[in-house]
Amino acid sequence: MNFFDDFSSLSNSFYATLLLATVLAFLGVHVILRRVVFVGIALSEMSSLGIASSFYLERFEFTEPGRMFSFAREHLIMGTLLNFLGLVFLSPTESKRLSREARIGICFAAAGALAILLVALSPRGMDEIRALMAHDPLFISHQDLTVLFSTMIPALLGLVLFFRRFLLVAFDREMAISLGVHAKNWDMFFYLLLGLSIAMAIHFSGVLFAIGFLVLPSSAALSVGRRPWTIFLIASAIGLFSAVVGYVAGYHFDLPLGPTAVGIAFVIFILTQAGRRMSEFARIH
Amino acid sequence: MTQGSYLGIVGPNGCGKTTLLKAILGILPLLGGNLDWADGRRPRIGYVPQRDAIDPIYPYRALEVVLLGLGTEHVFRPSPTREMRERAERALERVGLANHRYKGYSELSGGQRQRVLVARAIAVEPQLFALDEPTSGLDPGSTERLLDVVDEMRELHHLTVILVSHDLSLVARRATHALAMFEGKYVVGPVETTITTEQLSHLYQYPLRVVRSNGDVSVGPHRERKSVSGS
């Protein structure tokens, strides 16, 4: 299989992968710095639950095309809806009785269990559903690509334009408020972007790709970058590079594309760790 | 509070000093009462939080931490302008950290981090300086140097200062007014009439003694000296 010969048929999924990888890597720096990686993981479970719900609801007449609740059969809509529901449950408020960590755990366990049950009860075959829920980003239609670009490009723009504001609110929330910044609104905006990006990534590329690209490029960039802007740039570059190499290599060697790209990102992460250790060793000796 | 006054908020752990300060700053909602600003407008506030409230995982250098407080009125927060950089550098110079401006915030000592936070509050060019336990965990020299900077700023720019502290002696020495809180009770007024042996002993329900001599004030436990007889 030659990637370049087949590019015309692969271009949609290739561009989708690159865009998702870049957005997730950029977003991942915020996620790591805010120490909310587990929020991301719990949200991915909620997206999966949304997709599983859409499979389950196919058995009901009220979701048939043309009916009021026909949107319930749309995987992307249900994934995004459940993701936002998860965001409400995990919103960064501290309850004295139930810590945020506990809520993350509850969300993860409940959503995971319910997704499996709904899949088991759904009218479709298990293998078909599994393939859809953890699928490779290989078959993406032109319409899918349009939906993805029309949501993710504004999300990326928002992340770039407001990156200083997001950092300020996360770094020292109280100081930001004392200076008249509406920290709660900015937090809400950030979590909406996070939820939307994860929902899109889960739908088009699967859980592994979403979490892998949220965590690995940003962790690698934080190990080698010294200034905020450079860290965001390095993370995005690593995300983009891993996606391109993973996609081409995966296609060439007939490997699953998502895991291959995540594997490449992991190799880069290991190389950055080794490089950092070596430079520290050289500085000491 | 009148402009230029220096209010020290004191009291034991859990009495609500920090809660009160945060309510004044708008970080926490008011559960009762009103907050009236002199000319009806909220002043520009330079806030110095407890340094433990800042997560050192962020890859900021000292200068960048100071710059964070600048330009917040712009939603798009452009890259710092030359004027912003100069202001930030001047503020770092004022707290004695000009040579550390390119050092990582996480690499600084506790005292230096606290001074960076003070520099950040100075750079905002505040009308109200609010400090929450800025000297906790600092050695006496660092404590005095840091509070000297606050005094200097207050005199230079006629700032209003609110300082939350456990340290009664420190507040008695530096502040013009004091608010002493304990279990829902409070005493407020000029520091000479608030930080007194009678007031504090009554408030804390523990014998405390305020000693004023040669312009210095110290507050400590009042213990009767027992005469030692025999060999």
Image (spheres, rainbow, N blue to C red):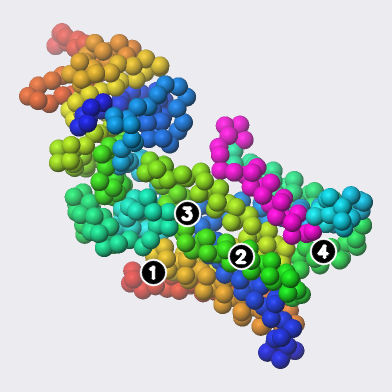
User: Eyeballing the image, is B81 above or below B169?
Assistant: below
- Between marks 2 and 3 in the image, the one whose residue lies nearer the viewer: 2
User: What secondary structure is the magenta-colored segment mainly?
Assistant: helix
Q: Earlier in the sequence, mark 1 or mark 2?
A: 2
Q: Earlier in the sequence, mark 2 or mark 4?
A: 4
Say whether mark 4 and mark 1 are on the same chain.
yes
Residue contact at pointers 3 and 4, CB within 8 angstroms = no
Is B199 left or right of B16, judged from the image as shown?
A: left
Q: Earlier in the sequence, mark 2 or mark 3?
A: 2
Residue A120 visible in the picture: no
Q: Earlier in the sequence, mark 1 or mark 3?
A: 3
Is A84 magenta? The answer is yes
Q: CA–CA distance between discs 1 and 2? A: 38 Å
Residue contact at pointers 1 and 3, CB within 8 angstroms = no
Kindly indicate the quadrant of the structure image that contains residue A250: bottom right
Say what secondary structure mark 2 lies in.
helix
Q: CA–CA distance between discs 2 and 4? A: 25 Å
Q: Which residues are magenta?
A: A74-98
Q: Chain of mark 1?
A: A
Say what secondary structure mark 1 lies in.
helix
- Between marks 1 and 2 in the image, the one whose residue lies nearer the viewer: 2
Residue pointed to by mark 4: A130
Residue A190 visible in the picture: yes
Q: Earlier in the sequence, mark 1 or mark 4?
A: 4
Is A18 left or right of B1, judged from the image as shown?
A: right
- Between marks 1 and 4 in the image, the one whose residue lies nearer the viewer: 4
Residue pointed to by mark 3: A166
Which image quarter holds the N terminus of chain A? Answer: bottom right
Residue A152 disc label: 2
